[in-house]
Image (tube, rainbow, N blue to C red):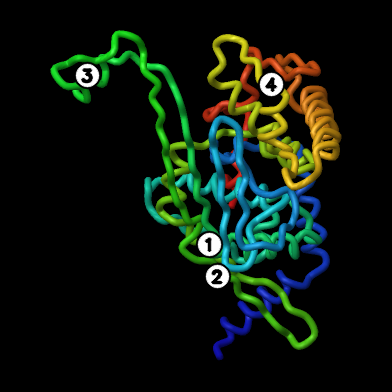
Amino acid sequence: MSKKADKDDVIQQNELTDPNLISLFDLEIEAQKASPVMAFIPSFFTTASLPFKNVHKPVFVRKGANGITLTLSSPKNVPFGKYGRLLLSVLTTHAVLSKEKNQAVLLEFKTLSELLRELQLPKQRGKDIKEQLECFSNAQFAFDIETKELKAAYLFKDLYEDGNYPKSDVVVKTKTTGNIRFTNGVQIQEIDDGSDVKTAGIKIVLSPEFSGFCQRHAVPIDYGVYKDISSPVGKDIYAWLVYRNNGIKEPIFIPRDKIVDQFMPVNEEKDRLTQMKTFSNNYNKILSLIKEIKEKYYEELNIGLDDDGITLYKSPTPILKDDTRYALITSDI
C-alpha cells in the first residue's frame, strides 16, 4: 500500500473517531439552526403520510381525506415516525434540485455524520437514520385517488348518439392510481475495527419515477420548523397548512370528521363508545397542534377553529420556492 493510501486511511479513521471533530460537528448543527433552511416534501404526503410510529409491518395503508388512499410497502418494514419524515424531506429536496428531470438521482455521503449534518441531527440519532434508510431501501408507495365533480354534459357529447347529451350537468368520477419506488438502490459501507462498527460511505439512488414525482409535486417548507415540531402528526399538519395556503381564494371550511380522518384516524375495530372518545381526543389534539404551530412557527396563519371543524383563510405563504432568505438544505454539501 502506498504512503498516500496510508495517509488517506488515517484521515478517514480520524474523521470517524476524533472526539474533537465530533464536537465541532455538533456545534456546526447549532450554527445551521440559526439560519432559515428551505427543503421540500411531496405534496401528496401532506394529505396521507407515513405511519406515526413503527408498525413492524411490510405494508401500511392510510385513507386520507378527499378519496385519497396511500399504501406503503417494503420487504421488511415501512418508513415511519419523525425521522422517516425528515429523511423523506432530504430525499425530496435532492430530487427537486436535480438538473436532470425524470431521471435517477444519486446521493452520496462520505460518512453517516455528513448525512446527519444535512438533516441537522446530532450524532446520537445515527442509529435512527440508519433504521429509516433500511426502511426506504426497496420501499414503494401506491396511491389511489377518487374525485367527483360536476361538469357540463356537452363536454362529453361524443359519448352520446346523435349528440343527444343531457342538458344538465353530469357527475364525472375519476380514479387515478400510481405505484412509485422511492429508490433504485441504497448502499451503506461499514468499518469494523474489531471493537466498534462505524458507518462510512452512503449511496442512495432515487428512482426516476420518484424524482419526477417530486419535481412535479413538491411543497417548499421551512426545514428548521419542520424539524423542530416534535410530533410526527404536527409535522404533517404544518406541511399541509403550508400546502393548502397556496391555493386558497375563498374561505374553506373542513368538518372535524374530515380533519380527524386525515391526520389521526380512529381504529374502526374498536367499539362505538371507544371510537367516539378517541375521535374527540384526536380532534382536540389536532386543534392543540394547530394552535402551537400558529403561535410558534406560522404566526401569519389565518385560521378559524371551533368544535365543528376548521376554516382556512388566505394567509401569507411562509416560504416561497425562490425565497432568498433561505439557504437550501443541500447547498453546502
> CB atoms at circles 1 and 4 under 8 Å apart?
no
Packing grade of label 4 (10 A; few <14, some 14-19, many >=20) is some
Please tell me which residue is depicted at 55% across the width and 88% down the height of the picture. Answer: 2
Please tell me which residue is depicted at 68% across the width and 72% down the height of the picture. Answer: 199
Note whether 329 is above or below 318 in the view shown.
Answer: below
Answer left or right for 234 relative to 66. Answer: right
Rendered image: mark on residue 187: 2
State the residue in front, 139 or 82. Answer: 139
> CB atoms at circles 2 and 1 under 8 Å apart?
yes
Rendered image: mark on residue 204: 1
Answer left or right for 158 relative to 275. Answer: left
Q: Position of residue 74 (x, y in %)?
A: 57, 62
Q: Quadrant of residue 15?
A: bottom right
State the residue in front, 15 or 182. Answer: 182
Residue type for callout 2: Gln
Q: Position of residue 124 (x, y in %)?
A: 81, 61
Is label 3 or label 2 in front?
A: 3
Is label 1 or label 4 in front?
A: 4
- Which residue is denoted by mark 4 in the rendering? 255
> CB atoms at circles 3 and 2 under 8 Å apart?
no
Disc 2 to disc 4, C-alpha distance: 45 Å
Disc 3 to disc 2, C-alpha distance: 54 Å
Q: Position of residue 272 (x, y in %)?
A: 80, 38
State the residue in front, 44 or 6. Answer: 44
